Image (cartoon, coloured by chain):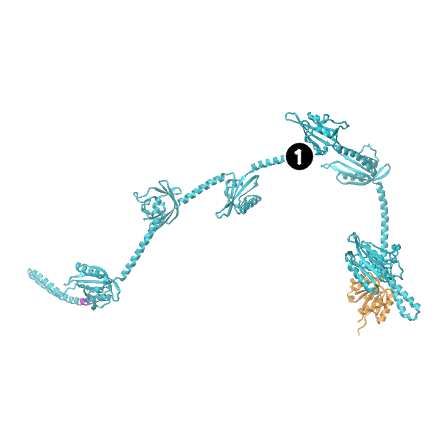
Chain colours: A orange, B cyan
């Protein structure tokens, strides 16, 4: 058995985190999820510094990145991830409310694997997340 | 070998010895004893001698016998046949050789006649030969042929002599074979004959040769003869002595030899030199005869050598070249004459090769080129003439060669005009080999022609000009005879009179046209100023009035001069009258316009001034005085002007004015201080300068712009406020954009959460809830979803406002049919009659235009929902510079009283229950169409359908 892949969720909105956890639980990977609440924390986690210095950590098999976050925007985080040689290959999926075409273009140009707009209807939302997990976080 | 002794017989010898002894004994009787003794001794000795002699003789006899045998052998085997014949011709003896020659043995011959063996033709000769021998006894020779066995003839020579010592005379004959000698003799004879024939031929040739040929017979040339041609040349009888070195009595004296004008000495003559051993060729000399004839000759001489190779004479040939020489001389003379003629010609004569080379030129041509003839010949004319001239001439030469005909052309060199006549020179085959050009200096002729032409032209031009001037003069010019009759008039006269007055007299004219003095008094023929002119007076500047044929009054200015004969009598006159009606009217008008100008300046508050430096006059218009507050009549100086200017602006105005004097433009605005009141003026000056840069004068205006300045100040205030407003609006707009962005993100999240959690709640607690509770949850969910759609559309609306518009050709036909097809699929249950007409290709953003079409069609589909049979028509028409597309339906329509809300955001004319919608679609349509530079509008009545139209400009220029 290969070890399960971990998913790092960068999301400041608690409500979204709850909804995501519900979906991941349903998928049976609730234990393999780590949540960071802003851009800076996300980078701290990925680089094992600040509060994550020496702490238990895992290398995420997928980063689900919200765009509008406190401190550092998702786009900024994406760029830093892609500028780190060790994280080059880590899949990053932008999961956002933004319908802005410009955002989408910038993220794809910045190295995002996919730009997914969060559907309002929950069933659609759950289906989209499950698809992403299957595509990037399963062995 | 011993010398053979005389072969005497012994008997004879005995007899002679006894005789001798007997003679001696006779003499003995006279002898004494001693003598006897002596004699005895002598006799004894003699006896011994005799015995010895006898012995000798015996020996001799033996020798003789041996010798005889030897001789017998010699006889027999001698190469010559020996015969001896008796007087009957019978052979007595024959040697072995003789027998061999006859092919017989000795025995067969001896005692037989030889004649049987002789060729019958020679028989007689042989008999005669023998007879001759026997009769004469002398040695005889004859040649006969023997007839041998087999018929073969053998030529032999017989040499016979008679031996008559014996009793019977015997003919001894030596016969030798002369076959070889005969053959040689025959060959010699043949060769001699040939030689003779050849000599004959040569002699004939020599005699018959048409050129003089001489034979010098000795090295000293004392004897020389010639053939017939030679004698003919020298006018001598054939065979005469011709050598000038011959002995005086035979020497010819009637000619002398010359070379190059000098008489030749005899030893220099080619014949004599040849006779001394020299080979002579092409020796040109002449012979002058006493009769005055001269022959020109080419001499050739070849020495004749003797066996030792020493010269013994010569053969001397002359070629008479007199005729050739004469022809040459004649030609040379001709050439000289031609040359003299050519060189003395005033014409340049040139012979060009086809390559443009000078083959020959005369001295005139060379002189004109500044060269000597020999420096020109052989040169190409390109090397001598200036390039353009050479090129032109070569072109002409080529043309002559091409056309084959003569031609002529002119050109100019160093101010001299040449007329060239060119002729082709042909060879015997008729091909052009050269071109001869004769060039004549025609400068004077041409100049004279040109001068005459110019004069004629000038005269003609002058006449034409005068005619033109006469015809075009706005002045009425007429020519009159001394009675005042019109002889000639220009068109101006006819135009004003309304008819042609030529040939009419003044009274007739006065009858048709009324002339008056300025004060109105009529003019009669007598009182007309022309009457004074006919009396010899020159009149100028008389004004009068003339009514033309149409009754229009003209103010005329009369000028005239009398024409006089050479004697000074008046012969006629020329009138020059000017219609100054318009000038006077113009003067009036000008005065009027001056007044108008002054009034206009007053109204426009524009004053003007004029400066004339030369006349030192500065004039201001009334209005200028008024603006400056300086009363008219005040002395105007620069200081007066400066004093009126606002103190703060004086330096500025002064600086600009000084700059203007230096040529800078002068167009300034400044303030005046007039009676304590500030005025704004605009001043503009147009200065004129002399060529040396000094000021000639100028014109300028002064405009009172105080009102404008006040208005400007007001506008500036307004603009400032407007600017603030714009800035505020921009800030608001930015905020709005930010807001829109926030809406897209911040608003969607909570909506999603509401929807999400409501759904989760329904799942989790659904069965536990009451029906009403579940219904509430459904409301929450659907409200959230509607809110989501609203937010999305609002965002789209905002995006349409911001996004860049693509500019491309969009085929609305294709676009509409795609959209219609989509709706057809989405509404399978609906009965819709789609009518799509012809649609244009427009310029714009395909995505945005698709949004427009989708929205309008979606509305049509939506609002025809209640109709059992819907009808949707999409069509197009052109209207000037724009396309108009419409979507017409037969739906529920709307009340036009609410039209103003139709395209507003969130504005809806129907209930959400009846026709759900966000109220953003049409606002978005309008926004897109406006951004494409078009309009959108609608027409409808309730329940009678609606028509939505939009226009798009045909050109994509302008702001989008």
The foreground one among B425 and A132 is B425
The single residue placed furthest to the bottom in the displayed view is: A1
Q: Position of residue B467 (x, y in %)?
A: 66, 34
Q: Tell me the magenta residue range.
A: B64-68
Q: Relative to B847, is B286 on the left or the right?
A: left
- Magenta stretch: dominant SS? helix
Q: Position of residue B426 (x, y in %)?
A: 50, 46
Q: Relative to B419, is A101 on the left or the right?
A: right
The foreground one among B318 and B34 is B318
Quadrant housing residue B388: top right
Q: Is residue B416 visible?
A: yes
Note whether B554 is above or below B240 in the view shown.
above
Quadrant housing residue B97: bottom left
| Residue at the disc numbered 1 | B467
- B636 in magenta: no
Q: Relative to B59, is B845 on the left or the right?
A: right
Q: Position of residue B112 (x, y in %)?
A: 19, 66
């Amino acid at each position: 058995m290969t070890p399960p892949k971990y998913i790092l969720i960068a999301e400041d909105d608690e409500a979204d985190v709850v909804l995501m956890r519900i979906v991941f639980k349903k998928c049976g990977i609730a234990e393999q999820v780590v949540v960071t609440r802003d851009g800076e924390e996300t980078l701290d986690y990925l680089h094992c510094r600040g509060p994550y210095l020496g702490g238990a950590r895992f290398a995420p098999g997928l980063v689900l990145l919200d765009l509008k976050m406190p401190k550092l925007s998702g786009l900024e985080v994406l760029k830093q991830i892609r500028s780190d040689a060790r994280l080059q290959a880590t899949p990053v999926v932008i999961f956002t409310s933004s319908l802005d075409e410009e955002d989408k273009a910038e993220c794809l140009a910045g190295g995002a694997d996919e730009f997914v707009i969060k559907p309002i209807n929950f069933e659609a939302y759950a289906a989209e997340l499950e698809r992403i997990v299957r595509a990037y976080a399963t062995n | 070998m011993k010398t053979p002794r005389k072969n005497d017989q012994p008997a004879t010898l005995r007899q002679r010895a006894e005789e001798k002894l007997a003679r001696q004994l006779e003499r003995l009787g006279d002898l004494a004893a001693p003598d006897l003794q002596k004699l005895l001794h002598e006799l004894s000795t003699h006896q011994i001698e005799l015995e010895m002699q006898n012995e000798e003789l015996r020996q001799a006899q033996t020798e003789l016998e041996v010798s005889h045998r030897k001789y017998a052998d010699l006889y027999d085997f001698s190469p010559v046949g020996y015969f001896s014949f008796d007087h009957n011709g019978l052979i007595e003896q024959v040697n072995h050789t003789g027998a061999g020659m006859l092919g017989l043995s000795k025995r067969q011959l001896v005692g037989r006649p030889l004649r049987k063996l002789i060729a019958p033709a020679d028989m007689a000769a042989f008999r005669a030969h023998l007879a001759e021998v026997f009769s004469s006894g002398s040695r005889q020779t004859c040649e006969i042929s023997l007839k041998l066995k087999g018929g073969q003839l053998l030529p032999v020579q017989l040499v016979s002599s008679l031996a008559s010592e014996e009793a019977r005379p015997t003919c001894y004959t030596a016969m030798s074979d002369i076959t070889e000698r005969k053959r040689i003799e025959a060959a010699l004879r043949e060769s001699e004959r040939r030689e003779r024939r050849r000599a004959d031929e040569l002699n004939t040739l020599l005699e018959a040769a048409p050129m003089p040929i001489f034979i010098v017979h000795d090295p000293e040339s004392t004897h020389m003869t010639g053939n017939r041609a030679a004698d003919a040349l020298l006018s001598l009888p054939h065979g005469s002595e011709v050598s000038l070195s011959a002995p005086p009595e035979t020497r010819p004296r009637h000619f002398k030899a010359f070379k190059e004008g000098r008489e030749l000495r005899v030893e220099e003559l080619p014949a004599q030199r040849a006779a001394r051993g020299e080979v002579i060729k092409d020796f040109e000399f002449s012979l002058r005869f006493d009769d005055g004839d001269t022959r020109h000759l080419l001499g050739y001489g070849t020495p004749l050598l003797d066996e030792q190779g020493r010269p013994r004479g010569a053969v001397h040939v002359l070629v008479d070249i007199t005729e050739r020489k004469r022809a040459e001389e004649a030609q040379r003379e001709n050439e000289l004459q031609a040359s003299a003629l050519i060189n003395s010609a005033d014409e340049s004569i040139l012979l060009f090769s086809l390559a443009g080379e000078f083959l020959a030129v005369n001295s005139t041509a060379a002189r004109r080129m500044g060269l000597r003839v020999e420096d020109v010949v052989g040169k190409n004319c390109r090397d001598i003439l200036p390039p353009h001239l050479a090129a032109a001439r070569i072109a002409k030469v080529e043309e002559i060669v091409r056309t084959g005909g003569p031609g002529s052309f002119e050109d100019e060199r160093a101010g001299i005009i040449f007329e060239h006549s060119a002729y082709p020179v042909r060879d015997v085959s008729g091909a052009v080999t050269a071109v001869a050009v004769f060039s004549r200096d025609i400068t004077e002729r041409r100049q004279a022609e040109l001068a005459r032409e110019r004069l004629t032209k000038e005269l003609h031009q002058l006449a034409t000009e005068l005619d033109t001037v006469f015809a075009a003069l706005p002045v009425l010019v007429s020519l009159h005879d001394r009675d005042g009759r019109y002889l000639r008039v220009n068109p101006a006269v006819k135009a004003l009179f309304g008819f042609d007055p030529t040939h009419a007299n003044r009274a007739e004219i006065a009858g048709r046209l009324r002339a008056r003095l300025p004060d109105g008094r009529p003019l009669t023929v007598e009182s007309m100023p022309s009457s004074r002119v006919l009396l010899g007076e020159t009149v100028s500047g008389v004004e009068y009035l003339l009514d033309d044929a149409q009754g229009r009054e003209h103010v005329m200015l009369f000028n005239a001069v009398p024409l006089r004969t050479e004697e000074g009598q008046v012969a006629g006159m020329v009138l020059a009258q000017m219609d100054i009606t318009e000038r006077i009217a113009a003067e009036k008008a000008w005065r009027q316009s001056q007044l108008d100008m002054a009034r206009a300046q007053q109204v426009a508050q524009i004053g003007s001034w004029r400066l004339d430096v030369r006349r030192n006059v500065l004039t201001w218009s009334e209005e200028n005085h008024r603006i400056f507050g300086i009363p008219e009549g005040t002395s105007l100086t620069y200081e007066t002007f400066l004093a009126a200017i606002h103190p703060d602006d004086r330096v500025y105005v002064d600086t600009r004015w000084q700059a203007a004097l230096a040529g800078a433009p002068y167009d300034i605005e400044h303030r005046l201080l007039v009676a304590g009141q500030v005025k704004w003026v605009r001043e503009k000056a147009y200065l004129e300068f002399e060529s040396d840069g000094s000021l000639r004068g100028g014109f300028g205006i002064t405009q009172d712009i105080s009102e404008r300045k006040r208005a400007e100040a007001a506008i500036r205030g307004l603009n400032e406020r407007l600017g603030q407003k714009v800035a505020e609006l921009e800030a608001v707009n930015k905020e709005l954009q930010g807001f829109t962005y926030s809406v897209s993100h911040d608003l969607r999240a909570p909506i999603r959460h509401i929807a999400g959690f409501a759904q989760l709640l329904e799942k989790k607690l659904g069965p536990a809830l009451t029906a009403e509770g579940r219904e509430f949850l459904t409301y929450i969910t659907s409200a959230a979803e509607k809110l989501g759609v609203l937010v999305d559309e609002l965002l789209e609306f905002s995006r349409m406002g911001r996004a860049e518009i693509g500019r491309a050709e969009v085929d609305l036909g294709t676009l509409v049919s795609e959209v219609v097809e989509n709706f057809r699929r989405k509404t399978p249950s609906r009965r819709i009659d789609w009518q799509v007409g012809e649609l244009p290709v427009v310029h714009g953003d395909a995505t945005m235009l698709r949004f427009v079409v989708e929205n309008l069609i979606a509305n049509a589909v939506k609002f025809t929902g209640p109709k059992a049979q819907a009808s949707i028509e999409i069509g197009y028409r052109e209207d000037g510079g724009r396309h108009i597309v419409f979507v017409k339906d037969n739906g529920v329509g709307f009340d036009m009283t609410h039209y103003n809300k139709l395209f507003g955001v969130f504005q809806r004319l129907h209930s959400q229950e009846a026709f759900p919608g966000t109220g953003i679609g049409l606002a978005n349509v309008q926004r897109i169409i406006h951004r494409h530079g078009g309009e959108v509008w609608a027409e409808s009545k309730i329940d009678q359908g609606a028509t939505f139209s939009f226009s798009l400009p045909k050109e994509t220029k302008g702001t989008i």
